[in-house]
Image: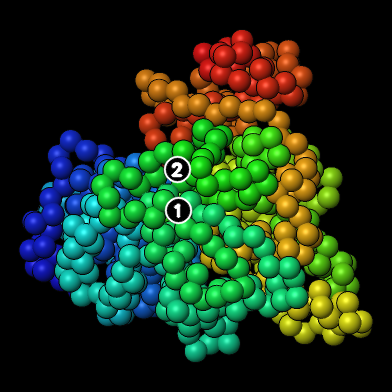
Amino acid sequence: QLPLNAIKHYSDAHSKPPDLHFQYGTAGFRTLGNTLDSVIFRVGILAGLRSKRLDGKTIGVMVTASHNPEQDNGVKLVDPRGEMLEASWEAHATLLANASSTDAFLEALTALVKSTKIDLSKPARVVYARDTRPSGPALISALEDGFKALGVEARDAGITTTPILHYLVKAINTKGTNESYGEDSEDGYFTKLSTSFKKLVAGKARPDPLIIDCANGVGAHAGAKLIEYLGDSFPLVLENTTTSTPGTLNESCGADFVKTMQRLPPTLANLMKPGQRACSLDGDADRLMYYYLDERGQFRMLDGDKIAALVAAFIVELVKLAGLDSEIKVGVVQTAYANGASTKYLAERLPVKCVPTGVKHLHHAAEHYDVGVYFEANGHGTVLFSKSTQDKLKSHEPSTPAQSTALNHLINLTQLINQTVGDALSDMLLVEVVLAHKSYSGVEWNSLYADLPNRLVKVVVGDRNGFKTEDAERRLVSPPGLQTKIDDLVRRYEGGRSFVRPSGTEDVVRVYAEAVVKSQADGGSPYFIEVTE
Ligand code: NG1
Ligand code: ZN
């Protein structure tokens, strides 16, 4: 039986704003922080029910709006293996969030319990965290009211990064099993990362200090802890760490700023010397962008596609060196936003698949490979090693010392990489491992292939739901006739490629265009202007 009286009591204190509609999209619920009170309260109850449905396994709840502006906030659920919420429950979440009154909410809950056959006698366990946004504390207390209303055993992970919360969920649910993911604490996370990193770079030259732009977000806290665990093995310099100054989060800094503006965060301008490498995290530290200044002081960006190319080539090489290339197949997953030059570079070397935008699509497609490398161009991504691949790595008998070394590197990579979700800090250490092994600076890394010039803009339209796509969002099926116009236009430009799709997180459509010549891909070119019109 649902504790209807308790839920009613709490729900009345978290009533839904009458004129707002909420949608659980690719990044959970995300909108202005001060409109989310009722949504987050209800998510607290939903998380508890999801846990009961899965026999008391621990569910994660993360309160964050990632790279979005400081006044935004959001919430997403994490499933027991550390993955995104199962798709069918996204619709349940949307339904509950939009129930217009407490009575309607109670009715929707009762219907959900029935339709999904939830055994209410099972325990409900949740672990939750938030980023550094000012709206966070109030939203967390709404979430906790949801837990109290249902009687959830809730564990507060405090202020931490999205990837650490995903790590915790998986670590808690695998605790004491032979698939243990690590100690279920921040200490466990940092120990796992730093131990495997040190093994992987043992004997390699110590790199120059790396500047990390923390976007004035929670990555600053996590970065400071990482420094303690890494000790002398790798010097880090943290910048944009003012997490308590209002208005600074993601403002003219962070991974999204760098990717969209294709330039250095202004606060780093005086710190960077030619040749110097740096990277930017986003507001919840799950995205990573690298860059450096070339010898002329020019900004050079190394985005998610460049990370995928670097990492995939390295893993393919290790698999071969370990003598496992006939047994372990490495593949890459991208979205339509991947630079055409990266797709070409990768496809010449290994299987590449294109899927619709959104981490869950990339993640699921990557699970079909023995080793699946996935990155969005914006810097969100990771590498998945299938269960059978991990078993193979553990049981394989190397026949030469060189094979043994490569095998150990691969095993250490499975420990270094956060396989639950994109993780800026884990990805950063991964990049540095590859650079150290290849003796690459930013220059060599960047020259794996040359990016095609490109532009990405938002266009506000009357109704973005009128835009329907196919072929992994690379073609429009509606509005009728528009795709033909884009095709005609693109054909006139060398290496032209362009597509239009509705955003899943903002009320806009996004227009992407690339071409061989920069002036053609650029905002002022006839090509681009016609594409956006
Ligand atoms: P939308 O708004 O659907 O384009 C954006 C990003 C995605 C992903 C999600 C979730 C671009 C072009 N799109 O999605 O890659 O990160 O947000 O945060 O970067
Ligand atoms: Zn993020």
Q: Residue 261: x percent and y percent? A: 51, 33
Q: Are marks 2 and 1 in contact (CB under 8 Å)?
A: yes
Q: Going 47% across and 31% down the picture, which residue do you hit?
A: 502
Looking at the image, residue 341 sits to the left or right of residue 51; the answer is right
Q: Nearer the viewer, residue 121 or 324?
A: 324
Task: Say few, some or many: other residues with alpha carbon within 10 Å of mark 1 (under 14 / 14 to 19 / 20 or more).
Answer: some
- Residue 82 visible? The answer is yes
- Measured as percent of width and height from the top left, residue 436 is found at 73, 63
The residue shown at (39%, 44%) is 250
Q: How is the image coloured?
A: rainbow
Q: How many marks?
A: 2
**Residue, disc 2:** 267
* Residue 40 visible here: no
| Quadrant showing the N terminus | bottom left
For ligand 2, tell me if the residue under mark 2 lies within 8 Å. Answer: no
Q: Nearer the viewer, residue 472 or 32?
A: 32
Amino acid under disc 1: Glu
Q: Earlier in the sequence, mark 2 or mark 1?
A: 1
Which mark identifies residue 412?
Answer: none
Under circle 1, the secondary element is strand
Q: Nearer the viewer, residue 141 or 52?
A: 141
What is the crowding at mark 2: few (fewer than 14 residues within 10 Å), some, or many (at least 20)?
few
Rendered residue at 30%/76% (across/down)? 155
Left or right of 208 in this view: 440: right
Provide the secondary structure element on which disc 2 rests. helix
Against 14, residue 463 (above or below) is: above
Q: Marks 2 and 1, Cα distance to the nearest angstrom?
A: 8 Å
Does 235 appear above or below 408? above
Q: Which mark is residue 239?
A: 1
314 up-or-down from 301: above or below: below
Q: For the residue marked with disc 2, what is the amino acid?
A: Thr
Residue 252: % across, % down: 42, 39
